[in-house]
Each structure stands twice: as structure tokens, then as C-alpha cells.
Amino acid sequence: MCGIAGIFSPGQPPPSETLLRRMLYLLRHRGPDEFGIFLAPSIGLAHARLSIIDLSTGQQPMGNEDGSLRIVFNGEIFNYIELREDLVARGHRFRTRSDTEVILHLYEEKGAGAVDELNGQFAFAIWDAGRQELFLARDRMGIRPLFYARAGNDWVFGSEIKAIFAHPGASRKIDPIALDDIFTFWFPLSPRTAFEGIAEVPPAHTLTIDARGMKEPRRYWALPLETDPAGAHDDTYYADGLRDLMVDATRLQLRADVPVGAYLSGGLDSSVIASLARHYTPNPLRTFSIRFEDREFDEGAKQKIMTEYLGTEHREITCGYAEIAKAFPQVIWHAETPVVRVAPVPMFLLSRLVRDSSYKVVLTGEGADEILAGYDLFKEAKVRRFMEASPNSALRSRLLLRLYPYLRMSPTRSLEYAKAFFGATIKPFSPQFHSHASRWNMTSMNKNFFSPSLRAEIASSTAADRVALLFGDPAWANRIDPLTLSQEIEIKTLLPGYLLSSQGDRMLMGNSVEGRFPFLDHRVVEFSFRIPPHIRMKGLTEKYILRKSMSGLLPKEIMKMEKQPYRAPDARCFFDNGAGDVADAMLSTDSIARKGYFDPIYTERLVAKCRGNPNIGFKDNMAFISILSTQLLDQLYLRDFPAREEIPAERVRISG
Amino acid sequence: MEVEMLIRDFIVENFLFGNVDVPLGDEDSFLQKGFIDSTGILEVVSFIEEKFGIKVEDDDLLPENLDSIRRLADFVVRKRSLAA
């Protein structure tokens, strides 16, 4: 795993080496082991390496035999051994044992079509000297990040936005529309980022840039939305098929020249991965968990069931409020976006534990809820349709309590409340977003904190129009069943936009740890979407096929467990024993007014409410964290940005 | 009427943070409009109990009683007259 960056200056002499070393400095957490720069007329490529495969010869930037191609690559190609054998059989000669060189040879043969062959999590750039063309590519699900921007006459790209900001021609400004997106969806809609003028290469896309400019990004893979017809196969067929694929995905993802660990949250998904690694591969397994001092959030008991069952060597870290508050600014630095919850922070502290245990790679259960229908959101959508068919049925109402056991714990245990919730309006979103509208509308309420000047800047378009545009022709929604539709929306929005980035790659790589996600092997994704929806979620049993497929491979308690959303304490972290010094500075009326995004008076009242009441509701917590993180992002990137720090020349291998 | 005013002030102060530009009709459902999420209802209950000296029973926790300014005010008046 690594950090990559580069500058394309069409028709110009090689870009400044110092500038590339500055970009490397800003990416050094992604690859602290080795640094390399390639310089030639019109192009500069930079690479920060975390050595995992082919430790001795896998250095980058790497060229092909005649030097016509040059690559910088971040990620892993898990099927590189098989691809290499094919390429050798077709006459390609290899100089290293790395997966990087496999991409180069594949590109020689297939050009942009090379990505179709790759099974992996990747972001890479290839400089094609013959065509004077820069080629950028990103994996199907959006696991590895890649950003680009125009800076004066140059094109600049990087694994993280901060690398692009080293370029003096790149302006650093928070995009007002991105804030409108974040205060609706929790993240900016792709390809937008939190910063104006910086775009991401969308998941499953490639793009090429030459002297004439950038060509329209090309999508090379799409979620398959055609499910098998009901009755084509029985449940056992899908359960067996899923297990076989998961075993193979896990085996492939354990390929590394360093030991690989696994996260254990206490939930079903990470337990599946740890169990498969234990039962089907010879790897000795080390597992890692987060615990919370606050028992409301702690999952220690379930984690213990799993570690005892698997007999793994286990390490855990316990988070308290003060630690979360203290790490928050660092987390925002790595996330490069405002966030709506502190949930990324414990993930950052967990990857630190992994690094301190001298591990560089961990498997996680991320993605299972999206591809196998695990979230309450999917159940809600199902119940809503069911209720709408017969709104006054008492039997149907009782289903709501089944769906929300926690409703029983609050005044909202009343069915009438649940009905009011399920009857919430979809507007202003179009009907195909039925499943997501209540989350988005609730989040949108916090736009009431926007300052008049921010409101004026976002008046030109609406979040509802932008999300409709992202998904294109609404006729698509009528062609697929409602469950698949809500999963597709989730996989194209929250998964890459928040879970794999702010809560995934950025929190892992912030401590130089690579995450791997067997559920997101595209073969697993494709197979899961073939499962007919009524089996994928049987009644309201989420991830039914996954549970069935793991029969005999997990303890009963874990197997039967209902989905518990991963949560962490939010605003209260910042009011515990003076832990909130940073929050106090960032949220002072003066600071709010100076930065100009939010209304100082309303914000002051929000802060006072949070300070005085540890049990505030979800929406107010979200407002507090969103505002605090926006203020921090402004401070870290617009005011205190370390644009002139660099990796010293003697640590960098220069080629050209 | 006075009860309605006091409730409105509380909702605006506590959930809209004093932002009077947010349109809030007396009949608007808090839940459906998104002013208050399910966790926030607790705060409303504590407020009316303290402010108006009434006791909200479990059976009272219904949107008919709590889910708009008008409904809250009517509920408080009803409760007080029962107590009297």
C-alpha cells in the first residue's frame, strides 16, 4: 500500500523535484518505507511505499522494458500470480515478482481494458510516453482513493487531496456545495470533494488526460442489477456458492509478504472473515478490537466469544471520551472532509494499535451490510412498502417493533410514533430515493445552522437535484426490485463516500495500515446481487444467506445476533474533563463568525445545549460534530497548511 | 394562548436554536418535518412535565399527544384539567 502523486505539465520541462518531494511529505503516512520520483519532460511521478509484496524489488515509479510506460500504483492486485502466468505464457518478460509489473504488462497488451482483468483494490497512474498521455484508474468499489485537479496549466493528482495542495497553483477553498451535500448525505456526492476544484476519479472509472485536456471518464464496471428469477435455485445453492467465493476471496486477500491480521468488531461480518481466515488458510491469525469505556457502546463480550472460539492471539484498545476528543483534529486532517459523527476516530485509534503491534495489513468485514442487505435502512424500506399496502393493519404495525427492538427502550416505543416515522415525507427527493429520504431529510435539518452568506453560495442548485443527476434517468429505478434499488443507492453513495474513505482507507493509512475487504471482491459482489431479493433478506432476517453459508463455522450467539449499528459517543466526548479545548477554540462565537460558514448565535446555543446535556438526540449530536469538523477542516487546510515541508532529497530514489 | 406560546418558545429555542426563520406551523408534525428526531422526544416530555407540573404516563406517549405544538398544548390543558 502506498501513496501516489504526480504532475502533468503538457509541453513543459520536467516538473520541480522539490515540489514532488513536498507532495511525498504530505503522503508519507501512506508509505513510510521508501520514496521514489520519476522525472521526464511534461511529467513527474512520485511514490511513497509501504512494502507488502516483493519487498526487495518492487520499487516505484516502475517502467516497462523499453521505458515507454511508467507506473505509480497504490493497492493490491490479488490475482497477480494468475495474471502473471498468463502474461509469461504470451511472451512477456518480468524483472520483478511484484503485482505492479503485472499491471504494466497488461496495459501494454490491452491499454485501458487492462482494468477489466484486475481483481483488487487499486488506484494507479500510468504515463504513456509514446502517446504523451496520462492514464488514471480506480478500483470497482472505491476502496483506494485517487483525486485530481487543474492547477494553472498543470494537471495534478494524488492519493489524497493534501498532496495536490502542495502545488502552488492549486487553491484551497472549502466548496459550499460540498457542505450542502455533507449536510444532506454525510459526504460530497462523487466526483465532488470537500474542496472546490478538486475531483475524485469515481469508483470503477478510468480517465485519460493529454495535451488537449481530459477525456470524459469511462466507467468500466457496473453493479449487476439483474437478479436470478425466483425459484431458479434453492437457498442452499446460494449459501454454498457464497461460502466458496468468500473462502477464495479471503485466501487471495491473505497474499502478502508480511503477516496479515483481522479486525473483530463483535458483529457478524468481521466474525465471518476471521473465521474463514482461521478455518481455510494456514495463516496464524492475530485479531484486533476496539472497546469503549462507555458501556453503552462497548461490544467486548461478543468479541470475547469470538476470540475464544477461534483461539486467536488478540489485542484490544479501549477508547474513552478524552482520547476521542484529542485525536479528532488528526482524524479530520486525514479524512479531508467534515464528518457528521466521531465514529471514524476509534477506527483511527484501532489502526494505531495494529501498527504498534508491527502489523501492516488487516482484513475487515466492511461491505457485507451493503451487498448482502444488512442495514436497518433496507428493512425500513421493506416495512414501509408493506405498511403502505394496508396502512391500518394492526398486524403490520406490530412488525415495526420487530424491526426496531430499541424503540421499546424509548418513548417512541409507541406504534403510533413508528407509524409517523414511516409516514415521513420523501420530498424533496424523487420517489426512487424512498429508502433514503428520511435519513437525508433528518440530516438536512441541520442546514438551519448555515450562515446567510453560505446559503447565498449554495442557492444555485439543490441536493435533491444533484443526487437525481448522479443516478441519471429515473426509469432505471422501475426496472429493479426495491431492495436491490436501495442497496445500489447505498453502494454508490455512503459506502465509497464515507465508510471506505473517512471511516476506512484514510483512518487505516493514517497509521500506515492497509485494510482488505473480502466482501468487496467483485466476484462476491456480483454473486450477492444475483441472489433473489426475497432470499437475500428473508422476512426481516438480514444477511440470511450469509448466516446460512457460515453454518458450523461460527458460535451460535454470533450467528443469531441482530445487526447492531457501529456507534461511538459523539458530542459528549468534547465536554469531559476539559477534553474539549480544541472544540472550545473552534466553536467560539468569534471563530464561527470569522470562518463564516455558520450562524454564530445558533451555534452558540447548540454548544450550550450539548455542554449542559449529555443525552441530546441524534440530530443535535450530528449538528455539533458536523460544525466542529468543518471548522477544523478550515483551520487545518486553509490556515495552518504545511505546504513547504518536504522529504529530504537523500531519502528519495530519483529516476528519469 | 399562553401554553401554546410557551411550548413554541421551547421548541424554537431548544430544537431550532432560536432560528425563527424556520417555518414551524402549530399543526406541523415534529417527526415528519424532521424538527425533532425520535431521541429528542424525551426532551419535550421533560420540559412539559417540569414547566406545567404534569405527569406524562407511558400510555400518554403518543403522537396524538406530543407530535405538534397544538397537540402538545391541548394535551397539557387536558392533563391539567384532569388533575384539577
Image: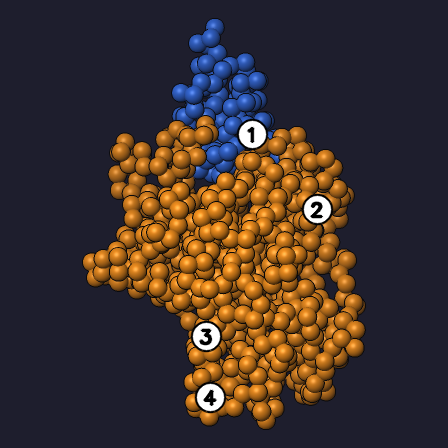
Query: For the residues marked 1 and 3, what is the alpha-carbon distance in whole angstroms?
Result: 58 Å
Q: Is residue A41 above or below residue A241?
A: below
Q: Are marks 2 and 3 in contact (CB under 8 Å)?
A: no
Callout 3 amino acid: Asn
Q: Are marks 3 and 4 in contact (CB under 8 Å)?
A: no
Circle number at residue A435: none
Specify the quadrant of the image occupied by residue A297: top right
In the picture provided, is A13 more to the left or to the right than A73?
A: right
Q: Nearer the viewer, mark 2 or mark 4?
A: 4
Residue A642 visible from this viewpoint: yes
Q: Which residue is mark 3?
A: A79
Mark 3 crowdedness (10 Å alpha carbons): few <14, some 14-19, many ≥20: some
Which is nearer the N-term, disc 3 or disc 4? Answer: 3
Q: Is residue B72 above or below residue A331?
A: above
Q: Which residue is mark 4?
A: A88
Q: Which residue is mark 2?
A: A326
- Give the letter of the blue chain: B
SS assignment at label 3? loop
Marked residue chain, label 2: A
Q: Residue visible at 69% across and 41% down?
A: A322
SS assignment at label 2? helix
Which is nearer the N-term, disc 2 or disc 4? Answer: 4
Q: Which residue is mark 1?
A: B11
Residue nearer the viewer, A115 or A299: A299
Quarter placement of the C terminus of chain A: bottom right
Q: Residue visible at 20% across and 58% down?
A: A231
Q: Position of residue A170 (x, y in %)?
A: 70, 69
